[in-house]
Image (tube, rainbow, N blue to C red):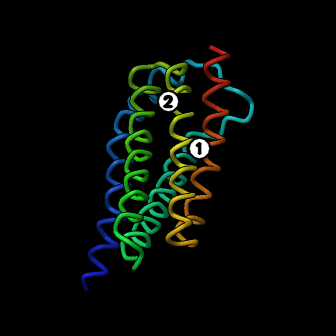
Amino acid sequence: MKQVIRLFICILIPVAIGAVSGFFTSAGVQGWYKTLVKPSFNPPNWLFAPVWTTLYIMMGIACYLVWKSSKAESEKRQALTLYGIQLVLNFFWSIIFFYLEQPGWAFVEIIFLWIFILLTILSFRKISIAAAWLLVPYICWVSFASLLNFYIWKLN
């Protein structure tokens, strides 16, 4: 039962952070974002919520695999610290882009996010290869989001 609670907590944290950042996102999507010129490869708005929800669940499972690992506590602490940093950066990107309406600064921030996701993957890999692989779709999506962010910034 203890492991189920840990798994639930690990999934709940990124999903909750995503839900709160979604609050800032939804206000921007309904207003300012609709007025922007977007590149031809911009996906439809309805796609973002299910993709992010799936990614947040995968992030939570990856976190759980690291947390429950029998590896040294110092190694897990380092990995989970990197995980926490990237989660904070993930949260603030939505605020910068959608709430503050600053795609240029959001682009700078998403570069830092991408770097910390990569560092998290590399750190998780030392503890659990499965945990590292669970974050690969996330870094791929953030890579795409970075490109999208850059083009929106340049087109506007």
Q: Which mark is residue 142?
A: 1
Q: Position of residue 137 (x, y in %)?
A: 61, 57
Q: Is residue 79 above or below residue 145?
A: below
Q: Is residue 46 left or right of residue 39?
A: left
The vertical placement of 108 against 132, above or below, is above
Residue under the image location 44 percent in, 45 percent down: 86
Q: How many marks?
A: 2
Tell which tag, 1 or 2, sits nearer the viewer. 2
Callout 1, which amino acid? Val
Q: In which quadrant will I find the C terminus?
A: top right
- Please, which residue is most extreme toward the top here? 156
Q: Is residue 12 above or below residue 82?
A: below
Badge 1 marks a residue whose secondary structure is helix
Q: In which quarter of the image is the N terminus?
A: bottom left
Q: Distance between the residues labelled 1 and 2?
A: 12 Å
Residue of label 2 = 109
x and y percentages locating residue 131 in the rendered image: 52, 68
Is residue 38 toward the left or the right of residue 77 in the image? right
Asked whether disc 1 touches disc 2, contact meaning CB atoms under 8 Å apart, the reply is: no
Q: Residues within 10 Å of mark 2 (few under 14, many from 20)?
A: some
Q: Where residue 25 sits in the image (x, y, percent)?
A: 42, 34
Dot 1, crowdedness within 10 Å: few (<14), some or many (≥20)? some
* Dot 2: element: helix
Kind of residue indicated by mark 2: Glu
Which disc number belongs to residue 28? none
In the rendered image, which quarter is residue 23 located in? top left
Left or right of residue 20, residue 132 in this image: right
Q: Residue at x 71, y 27 (%)?
A: 39
Q: If you read the primary sequence from the N terminus, does the residue marked by circle 1 or circle 2 appear first?
A: 2
* Residue at x 42%, y 53% (from the top left corner): 83
Name which quarter of the figure residue 11 lies in.
Answer: bottom left
